[in-house]
Image: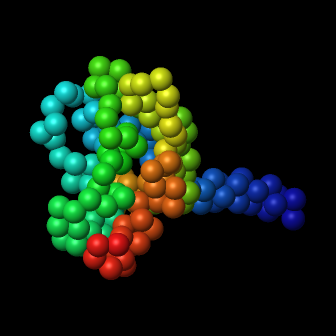
């Protein structure tokens, strides 16, 4: 009986280790964050708006498409600021983002916290929920001072509101 137990313990431990959620490699997350935040380091305003960047999960991308059709160039609470800098203006020479933490939420979900400094004397912290889709890590939600309930919830609220509200 001791021999069987001695053999089964390492196998059980190996099963638990392999069952633990493996999140994205930090390099994968940093590549995604560079796509999201990298444009702020340029003085050019020719780049895509934050909601046009190819960094979102299928669910958020669908919500954004519906939202863009709905707003039709009208200002809303989501369209009057840049989502990733959580600002309206930034200093491209001093703009910085720093990944503070990264943790797995499951085999295909992770959470990353990012400190964002728009170039002024203050910074803010954003929380991004990531999902793995099509072999890539993508943003499935973004929480910041500008969207404390998250991008998903705020997009849904704006889609549900009557035009002009």
Q: Position of residue 73 (x, y in %)?
A: 17, 61
Residue furthest front as drawn: 164
Compared across the picture, whether 93 is left or right of 3 comes to: left
Towards the viewer: 78 or 106:
78
The percent coordinates of residue 11 (x first, y second) are: 68, 57
Q: Residue at x 28, y 41 (%)?
A: 35
Res. 55 visible in picture: no
- Give left or right: position of 15 versus 45: right
Query: In the rendered view, how is the structure colored?
Result: rainbow
Residue 122 appears anywhere in the view? yes
Residue at 74 percent of width and 60 percent of height: 8
Q: Position of residue 144 (x, y in %)?
A: 48, 49
Q: Nearer the viewer, residue 6 or 164?
A: 164
Farthest-out residue, left: 46
Asked if residue 140 lies left or right of residue 19, the reply is: left
Number of dots carrying numbers: 0
Where does the C terminus fall, quadrant-wise? bottom left
The quarter of the rendered structure image containing the N terminus is bottom right
- Residue at 50% across, 37% down: 124
Where is residue 158 drawn, in percent x and y?
A: 36, 70
- Nearest the viewer among 98 and 23 is 98
Against 67, residue 9 (above or below) is above
Residue 78, by quadrant, is: bottom left
Q: Residue at x 46, y 55 (%)?
A: 147
Looking at the image, the residue that sits furthest to the top is 93
Tell me: residue 16, above or below residue 91: below
């Amino acid at each position: 009986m001791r021999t069987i137990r001695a053999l089964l313990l390492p196998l059980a431990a190996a099963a638990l280790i392999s069952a633990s959620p493996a999140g994205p490699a930090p390099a994968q997350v940093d590549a995604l964050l560079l796509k999201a935040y990298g444009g702020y380091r340029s003085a050019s305003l020719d780049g895509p708006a934050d909601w046009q960047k190819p960094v979102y999960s299928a669910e958020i991308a669908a919500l954004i498409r519906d939202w863009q059709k709905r707003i039709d160039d009208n200002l809303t609470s989501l369209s009057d600021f840049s989502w990733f800098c959580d600002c309206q203006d930034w200093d491209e020479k001093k703009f910085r983002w720093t990944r503070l933490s990264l943790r797995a939420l499951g085999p295909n979900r992770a959470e990353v916290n990012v400190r964002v400094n728009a170039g002024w004397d203050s910074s803010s912290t954003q929380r991004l929920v990531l999902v793995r889709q099509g072999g890539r890590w993508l943003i499935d939600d973004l929480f910041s001072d500008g969207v404390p309930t998250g991008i998903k919830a705020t997009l849904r609220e704006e889609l549900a509101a009557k035009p002009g509200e």
